[in-house]
Image: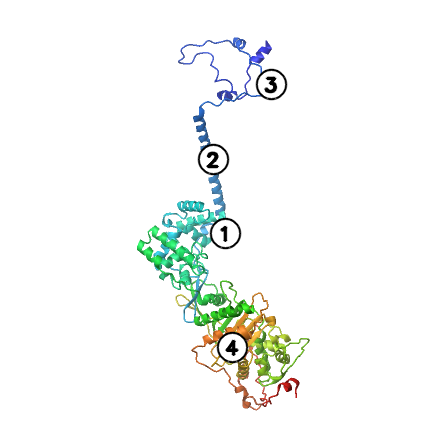
Amino acid sequence: MADKRRTSRRVEPASGSRARSLGFFGTGAKKPVGKPAKGSSRPSKAVPAAKRTATAKPAPRKAAGAAGRRGPVRRPPGGIVATTVRFFRGVVYWSVVASIIAVAGVAALVAYSWSKLPPASEWTVPKRPANVRIVSADGALLTNRGDTVGRSLTLAEMPGYLPEAVIAIEDRRFYYHLGIDPIGLGRAVLANFRAGDVVQGGSTLTQQLAKNLFLNPERTIERKIQEVILAVWLELRLTKREILELYLNRVYLGAGAYGVDAAAHRYFGKSAREVTVAEAAMLAGLLKAPGRYSPLLDAQAAEDRARLVIAAMREAGYLDDRAAAAALADEVKTVRDVAGGSGRYVADWVMDQLPGYVGTLDADVIVETTIDLGLQSLAARAIANTLSAEGGERGVSQGALVAMAPDGAVKALVGGRDYAASPFNRAVAAKRQPGSSFKPFVFLAALETGLTPESVRIDQPISIRGWSPENYTRKYLGPVTLRTALALSLNTVAAQLAAEVGPAAVVATARRLGIRSPLHATPSIALGTSEATLIEMTGAYAVFANGGLGVIPHVIRRIRTEDGRILYERSGSGPGQVVHPAHVAMMNAMLQEAMVTGTGKSAALPGWPAAGKTGTSQDFRDAWFIGYTAALVAGVWFGNDDNRPTRKATGSNVAAAAWHRFMAGALDGVPVAALPGGTAYRDPATLAGGGPPDAIGAHIATIGEDGEVLSAPPPPLPAEAAPPARERKGFLRRLFGG
């Protein structure tokens, strides 16, 4: 009986009510015991529990083979409609949960990015950095420099179609959004998805301005969020016109131009006030990729992009059909930078010196320079043409040129072959061995001890403290005058003179003439083994061109503000007399001989009294020519930046050729003038011991290591009678003596 009761009893889990409701234990809940439900047609009888147990059918035993199997699970009631409803309820539920999590995550990310910014109370639109307008001697624009590199214009000063072109191609909904444009962003995402690449940006003009004003250019999620925060702040702080004006004056448009005015000058040679519709479209087209759409680098790409901008302006309603057609037909003419870009070498040199004259700038300034644009163009062409004609054959990749008036005012400066490829200024910053172009300082030091150009030394193999210099030709001429020795650039004679006067005296002489680079007082200094810059060497030769006055090479004449207030104006004339006029006359006679019969004759200028000296460093690494007339001094250098040897490039070939190319054009139309001194040094009355007192010698300046003018002058000129005329000897007598 107990077994029967056990088999008839149904066992349910603790959560049986839930299982029962899902149909796992019968078709529904048990019928209630007791009173019938309201509305029932007939009452049900109560059955005693004992009887219910006795009459219940026992559950059939499972077959042995079916042990552990479960019967089919019944589907919940309600069918497919109820299942679908439950599915969508789940979707909605988890969507809400995901949205809450996403919003919380974005809020946390925004809060984190915001925390990286300065306190909002410190946010302010940065003051526009000062612009430096660099002009030539006649007031023509060389370039704009500074952090913005352009003049600031108001919207009223710009033609209306210039900002319209920018809005049409960059942010057509500019006047309708609050710093961020969800519609524009969605359109950009769709366009990029269709193209499979980034073809449109979703940033508004305000976002771009926020990035330019406050942020660095790195591409991170944090920076993008900060950009959005700052864009909204700008929209709340400024009017749309103020935002647009700031953007147009600060945006980078390639080629070193910041702002539409600087870009208009850079590409079209005019102010942004004067650009045409086609030019405005080309400027607006640069915003996407200044390097790719630069009219100076790829004219066709720039033109195609400008056409897209004009089409966008037509679509936006800024241009009608006639105006759009006229803009498409208009030919845009670009201008190259001053002298093919060489003017930027001048601008770099100006900017390096500017803080020393005016300190930190808080207003736009105009720097008036000594540069002559005509000579600057000639200099750039001389370097470029020489490298094109002979650079490949001679293994030369770079060149530089400096030209100045005899008073040291720089008229042209080219620091390299191509500024865009290499902005390093070889005319000012490169220190190279000047080779034989250093010898005039040796010969001048010798003259100041009492020698004359007619003094004689023996050109022969020598050894000085274990050092044995040789001539370039490996040949020796025997007895020669100093005039001949310098004209033919005889190394042995230069070495003898340096040994006679002492290397320290040679260093002091070079320092007095303006060489500021470190010089080593060793015997080899006679051959120019200490390095110097081209600007130093050219300035030192200017002393011979002006009669012995020391010069300080300079390019800045005046600095003033836009309203005319003078901040700096050059005054003074340098350190004064540094070489006696009689010695200047001697040096000019010897260096003239070098251009008539010596190593520099290929640089001769027919009709002009000119003097100069070649220079070639060891292993043909450097080729120099520095020469002058009474009107202009110029120095030229050629070589390689990595200091590798050239293929026998010398001062007599590539350097002399470039110097001649430049000077022939530079002196065209200039009245011919004689060099200082003439042949006065040959007058015996001038040099005889019983002549009048030498008043000039007492006023010659002495220059210290740092260029400071010292008070102790050298003694007056010593007297030496001019040597008698020598008998002309034959080759064998000169070679073997007798």
Between disc 2 and disc 4, the foreground one is: 4
Q: Earlier in the sequence, mark 1 or mark 2?
A: 2
Q: Which residue is mark 1?
A: 218
Residue at which label 4 appears: 603
User: Callout 1: few (<14), some (14-19), or many (20+) C-alpha neighbours within 10 Å?
Assistant: few
How many neighbours does mark 2 have within 10 angstroms: few (below 14), some (14-19), or many (20 or more)?
Answer: few
- Report if residue 220 is visible in the image: yes
Mark 4 burial class by Cα count in 10 Å: few <14, some 14-19, many 20+: many
Q: Measured along the vertical axis of the image, is residue 167 above or below residue 143? A: above
Residue 491 position by quadrant? bottom right
Tell me the distance, in whole angstroms, between the alpha carbons under discs 1 and 4. 54 Å
Question: Tags 3 and 2 in contact by the CB under 8 Å rule?
Answer: no
Q: How many marks?
A: 4
Q: CA distance from mark 1 to mark 2?
A: 34 Å
Q: Which residue bears the numbered disc 3?
A: 65
Q: Mark 2 and mark 4: span between their CA atoms? A: 87 Å
Residue found farthest to the front: 393
> Please, what is the three-letter code of the amino acid marked with disc 4?
Ala
Dot 1: element: loop
Give the amino acid at mark 3: Gly
Look at mark 2 in the image and give the residue it sits on: 97
* Inter-mark Cα distance, 3 to 2: 48 Å
Mark 1 or 4, nearer chain start: 1
Label 3 Cα neighbours within 10 Å, binned few <14 / some 14-19 / many ≥20:
few
Counting residues from the start of the chain, the first of labels 3 and 2 encountered is 3
Q: Earlier in the sequence, mark 3 or mark 4?
A: 3
